[in-house]
Amino acid sequence: MSYTGPEFESPQPRRPRRGPLTVALAALVPGALLGWGAYEALGDGGSDSAARPASRTASAASAPAASRGDDGKVSGSPSASSGGSGALQGKVVVIDPGHNPGNFRHTVEINRQVDIGTNSKECDTTGTSTNDGYTEASFSLDLAHRLRDLLEREGATVKLTHDGDSPPWGPCVDERARFGNAAHADAAISLHADGSAAGDRGFHVILPGSVHAGAADTRPIVGPSHELGVRLADTFHRATGEPPANYIGGGTGLVTRTDLGGLNLSTVPKVFIECGNMRDNTDAALLTSGSWRQRAAQGISEGIVSFLRDS
């Protein structure tokens, strides 16, 4: 994402796993480890690409995730994939790969305005890319496939909002939110990489702010989404070694926004993750590495598993 700008009942607060970044977050974000209490917005910011995925085979799907390398992409259908036995059996996770490799061929369609509750916004964008042309859409789709495999092994039913060529563009940001709502997802995550200035590096997790306007009402999901985001920030940092962003979020790796339709219109716990800055050479070297993307998928999976095990 280039740098620009049924109903969920909150259960009892959960105690997060306290990794090194979690402890740091506790010091920087009051109440970060206190469950679902009041949360102070950290500020606004964030970010808004195109190659075709390889086809998924039975052998690829069953190969150990850790063996995936730079060419270890797997793909599948945007319909549900059901996991077997495991800690997440009975849980539904929706993965929303940012943008779509076909968006650049459908500029009229993706420039159409859609209602996001607080105002109108473009249906979608093409996303960003590294300086040598590796697109955010390609990155997010590859990461989504790796993450899906890991979550299915934990027993989750995993649904993708799109799979590159199905549909051939979009979906629009409002449709992405409705996809998770209709799936009654226990957790939803939108995968992105940023397009900020060179020298800006690091990851950040985008949390929904409190919005109650038009079709948007995030109040029931602000708490659980914050909890999901805190756990993801911790596990992603530990798995990848990627630091919290040095240009947004005050070093916490957490940012709150109220201008993203994918969050505003969600009725299920949902966050975005910007895994790094594609325009910074240090981050770009990581984002274009298949082995690093596997570690990123592992870190995201661990955060989701931690959240859902305690829910």
Image: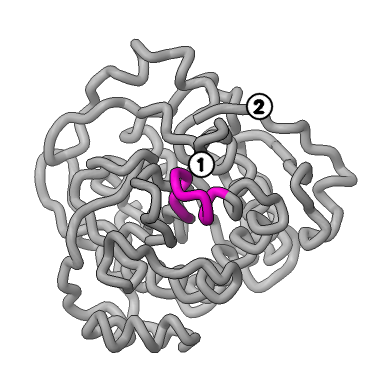
Q: Which residue is mark 2?
A: 52
Residue 179 on image: x %, y %: 43, 39
Q: Amino acid at mark 2?
A: Arg
Residue at 34% across / 34% down in the picture? 173
Q: Is residue 303 above or below residue 164?
A: below
Dot 2: what SS? loop
Q: Is residue 102 above or below residue 301?
A: above
Residue 135 relative to residue 51: left or right? left
Q: Is residue 303 above or below residue 184?
A: below
Q: Which residue is mark 1?
A: 97
Q: Amino acid at mark 1?
A: Pro
Residue 272 on image: x %, y %: 39, 53
Which stretch did the figure color magenta? Answer: 276-284
Residue 179 relative to residue 89: left or right? left
Residue at 49% across / 35% down in the picture? 129
Residue 200 versus residue 66: which sits nearer the camera?
A: 200
Residue 52 on image: x %, y %: 66, 27
Residues at discs 1 and 2 in contact (Cβ within 8 Å): no
- For the N terminus, the quadrant is top left
Residue 110 relative to residue 240: left or right? left
Is 35 colored magenta in this rendering? no
Quadrant of res 249? bottom left
Report crowding for label 1: few under 14, some 14 to 19, many 20 or more residues within 10 A (C-alpha): many
Quadrant of res 311? bottom left
In this rendering, the label closer to the viewer, 1 or 2: 2
Quadrant of res 154? bottom right
Is 282 colored magenta in this rendering? yes
* Colour approach in the figure: one colour
Residue 169 versus residue 255: which sits nearer the camera?
A: 255
Residue at 46% across / 54% down in the picture? 276
- The answer to whether residue 225 is seen in the rendering is no
Residue at 89% across / 46% down in the picture? 59
